[in-house]
Image (cartoon, rainbow, N blue to C red):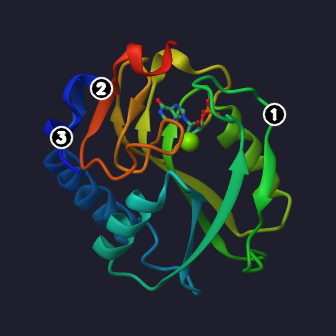
Amino acid sequence: MEASHLGDDLTSIVVSHQQLETRIREIAADIDRDYADIDKPLLMIGVLKGAVMVMADLARAISIPLHMDWMAVSSYGHGTKSSGVVRILKDLDIDIKDRHVLIVEDILDSGLTLSWLIRNLASRGPASVNVMTMMRKPDAIKVQVDARYIGFDIPNEFVVGFGLDYAEQYRHLRDVAILAPHVYQH
Ligand code: XMP
Ligand code: MG
């Protein structure tokens, strides 16, 4: 879906699909280099559902062997602010013991979800845990999270597109755009 199809639901595009594509290729090259010498395939863990687009594009730009698995956690419900309460809705299928794990996230906002997830995965005995996040909102951070790979720093506004939703809508928008407040302020 193109931003032009959404009329006044979007106020502006923050990251265009061309920018996403270019940055993903750069990050894939970094990952190829950083994990060149590991003994088992890199295990990329996507956080459903927002990370589906990032995972699909990033994985296909990577050349080293890799496995993919998915987790679903919930921290937001239908609102636009993190509750800080994280629940596992779907756990991993693959045992991550002694594996090099790369968490793939759509967005690092308050950091509550990722800091919880890193702790949860670290407790399962992996060889390493790192984070790739497509977007980060530096002004929203409440808990420090070390993300090794960061796509773009963006303003502290609610955004949709490239996997990110508002009440399940707009995930298939090709760009990342600011959602007009009139859409969620009723
Ligand atoms: P926290 O605050 O825990 O948030 O770092 C992480 C999760 O919250 C969702 N999120 C957003 N979703 N537009 C969205 O569509 C946003 O601007 C936004 N900010 C946070 C997202 O699912 C992320 O994984
Ligand atoms: Mg979401």
Dividing the picture into quadrants, the one containing residue 89 is bottom right
Residue drawn at the location 39% of the way across and 30% of the way down = 159
**Label tally:** 3
Judging by the rendered image, the residue that carries numbered circle 1 is 85
The 10 Å Cα crowd at callout 1, few under 14, some 14 to 19, many 20 or more, is: few
Dividing the picture into quadrants, the one containing residue 83 is top right
Q: Position of residue 182 (x, y in %)?
A: 39, 14
With 181 as the anchor, is 79 left or right in this view? right
Judging by the rendered image, the residue that carries numbered circle 3 is 5
Residue 9 is labelled as: 2
- For mark 1, give the secondary structure: loop
Dividing the picture into quadrants, the one containing residue 110 is top right
Task: Of the two numbered discs 3 and 1 on the same chain, state the one appearing first in sequence.
Answer: 3
Q: Pick the residue in front: 182 or 42.
A: 182
- Confirm or reject: label 1 Cβ below 8 Å from ligand 1: no
Residue 128 vertical position relative to residue 67 in the rendered view, above or below: above
**Residue type at the position of mark 3:** His
**Residue type at the position of mark 2:** Asp
Q: Point out the quarter of the image occupied by ligand 1.
A: top right
Residue drawn at the location 57% of the way across and 86% of the way down = 39
Q: Position of residue 167 (x, y in %)?
A: 54, 38
> Residues under labels 3 and 1: Cα distance?
35 Å
With 165 as the anchor, is 23 left or right in this view? left
**Residue type at the position of mark 1:** Val
Q: Position of residue 145 (x, y in %)?
A: 62, 35
Q: Pick the residue in front: 139 or 86.
A: 86
- For mark 2, give the secondary structure: helix
Residue drawn at the location 28% of the way across and 65% of the way down = 29
Mark 2 or mark 1, which is nearer to you? Answer: 2
Q: Pick the residue in front: 48 or 133.
A: 48
Task: Of the two numbered discs 2 and 1 on the same chain, state the one appearing first in sequence.
Answer: 2
